[in-house]
Image (cartoon, rainbow, N blue to C red):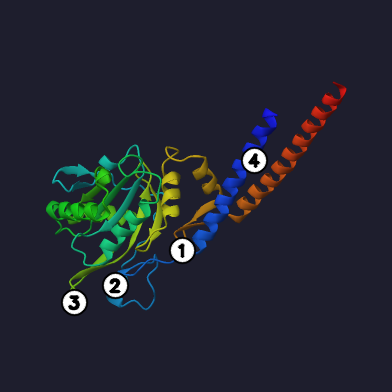
Amino acid sequence: CRSSGSIWRALLIVCILHAFCITEIKLSAQQQPGMPGSMGFTGGIVASNVPPKIQHVTFSQRLGERLPLDARFKDERGRDVALGDYFGSKPVVLAFVYYQCPMLCPLVMNGISSALKVVPFTAGKEFDVVLISFDPRDTPEAANAKKRAHMQHWAVPETADGWHFLTGTEQEIQRVTASAGFTYQWDEETQQYAHVSGVLVATPDGRLSRYFYGAEFSPKDLRLALVDSSQARLGSIVEELLLYCFHYDPSSGKYGAAFMNIMRLGGVLTVGLVVGFVVLMRRRESRQVAERHA
């Protein structure tokens, strides 16, 4: 009958989503850490054997803190902008880089693009990507050249309006980096900045929501972070189920499996299957009795 068919379709959807959760758990368990750079650190905690001159290079979490949205910068076209111009209606993927960086910063940018290619949201539509140079010597011309090269490399010109390459004065840069817990240090010997690599996701009202460390990023983590940070503006039933199966762990900077929730989901699925089977059998029995009476 039609109602029993609806029951089985609903249970099938739950089964598929539950299997999807389990698959995501297996995939997350197989993920490898990001690649290190020559003068950068890919972890959130600096090891004790780091040379003393760069022991203060950190990327500490400031979850829930609000960014200084009135900080002033120039975009890649040389226009005066405020950081808040990129907030208001969409979550923001934020990274601190510098455009003359020889190795680590390009890896971070490529890591963002590589992950976003798998994410079912589009930069410029559902979210924005904001890159802030922490080198006050960087110019809008350097930012524009870096953006054009990056967009061409990834062959995604349709998302160019969603990527913003900013430069600014040392004072404005430090206002933003300090609020995000990002510190860096110039090394005279190598003529490079020492810094920790990573990416942030911020809410539409400018609050720091998620930190991910390294130079390679999990598409699943970024996807869930965007949904988590969107203030209910993004997401479907699939993302809602994934957020039920996975919780963000600030200590690891990753989304980990919420095993208790998965067990609850499995219990609900089992009960649903049993109830659906009983209902189907009762309806079939009633139909057979009616046919015999007829």
Residue, disc 2: 54
Q: Quadrant of the N terminus?
A: top right
Pointer 2: residues within 10 angstroms few (<14), some, or many (20+)?
some
Residue, disc 4: 11
Q: What is the distance, in whole Å, between disc 1 and disc 3 at their CAs?
A: 35 Å
Q: Amino acid at mark 4?
A: Leu
Q: What is the distance, in whole Å, between disc 3 and disc 2 at their CAs?
A: 12 Å
Secondary-structure class at tag 1: loop
Q: Give the image location of residue 176, x and y in percent.
A: 27, 52
Residue pushed farthest right? 293
Q: What is the distance, in whole Å, between disc 1 and disc 2 at their CAs?
A: 29 Å
Residue, disc 1: 31
Secondary-structure class at tag 2: helix
Residue, disc 3: 189
Q: Count how many numbered circles sit on residues in the image.
A: 4
230 relative position to 134: left or right: right
Q: What is the distance, in whole Å, between disc 4 and disc 2 at their CAs?
A: 56 Å
Q: Give the image location of residue 127, x and y in percent.
A: 34, 43
Q: What is the distance, in whole Å, between disc 3 and disc 4 at their CAs?
A: 63 Å
